[in-house]
Amino acid sequence: MIKNILRKIRLLSNARKEPYFLFYKVLGFYPDKIDYYQLAIRHKSVSILTEDGHNLSNERLEFLGDAVLNSVVTDILYHRYEDQREGFLTNTRSKIVKRDSLNQLAVEIGLDKLVKVTKYVNAHTNNNIYGNALEALMGAIYLDYGYKKCKLFVEQRLIRTFIDLDKVAENEVNFKSKLIEWCQKYRLESEFVLVEDVLSKSNKHIFQTRLVVNGKTISEASGASKKESQQLVSQIAYQQILSNPDFLKELMQEPPEIIDTQENQLPEGDV
């Protein structure tokens, strides 16, 4: 009780201080331990070297916040859609927490204006910076106030204002599942082949996947994870199925037999 009263007094005294007010506009509440939040907006390109030789940036908070955000969104979806199965819940959660969605949400709440990054990093082309900062912010909230505050932040600041959950759930399409079901319907063998796994210049993994159906390469695509690349390659293939009425017929056709004319020619002396 006394601890909560002291916290409220401290928050009131800090309310007019600029750093606290700037975070208030993003969060919807005042930070208590502001150091967490200031670290959450610090990109590794402007990391601080400590006396013991460690570089301080938002990467560790991003790791923590990623887990917290997934847990919170899972919690919300589980209780909101009580009759839905695991696949539906997983797909809907993936769409909410995917990188593009987090980048957009970070901009919507104004977090992009607070992020500290060196001028040599182009935040427009490398806009994952903002989504990563949002995850780090979740880590900061968790350390400062705990899980319940994280859930309130997601529900009230993100979902209620910027995310139509029912629309996201309605539009969720698992192209990989649809592609596999289509192949099973026509008794076709499908295989997702990992072509390569490379590191980009920004030290992010890029996975390239090839979809092979009945021994024929149908499509290739790259993504930030194996799952994402498989979804993308399935989406390309499924769009081909919908747009080409003869797709199945062409797929079932055997490749033309190649005749080696040289092997079938008789030696000149045998003519």
Image: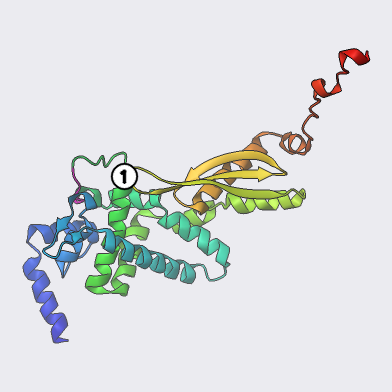
Please name the residue shown 62% across and 41% down the image. Answer: 237
Q: Is residue 234 above or below residue 9?
A: above
Residue 100 image position (x, y, % from top left): 39, 48
- Residue 191 can be seen in this image: yes
- Residue 108 can be seen in this image: no
Q: Say what secondary structure mark 1 lies in.
A: loop
Of residues 227 and 97, the one nearer the viewer is: 227
User: Which quarter of the image is occupied by the C terminus?
Assistant: top right
Mark 1: amino acid: Asn
Please name the residue shown 29% across and 49% down the image. Answer: 129
Please name the residue shown 21% across and 51% down the image. Answer: 115
Q: Which residues are magenta?
A: 114-118
Please name the residue shown 13% across and 86% down the image. Answer: 2
Residue 148 image position (x, y, % from top left): 31, 74
Of residues 271 and 17, the one nearer the viewer is: 271
User: Which quarter of the image is occupied by the N terminus?
Assistant: bottom left
Residue beneath label 1, please? 127
Q: How busy is the neighbourhood of tag 1: few (under 14 within 10 Å), some, or many (20 plus)? A: some
97 sits left or right of 141 in the view: right
Magenta part, dominant SS: loop
37 sits left or right of 258 in the view: left
Please tell me whether residue 145 belongs to the stretch shown in magenta: no
Number of residue marks: 1
Q: How is the image coloured?
A: rainbow
Q: Is residue 218 above or below residue 204?
A: above
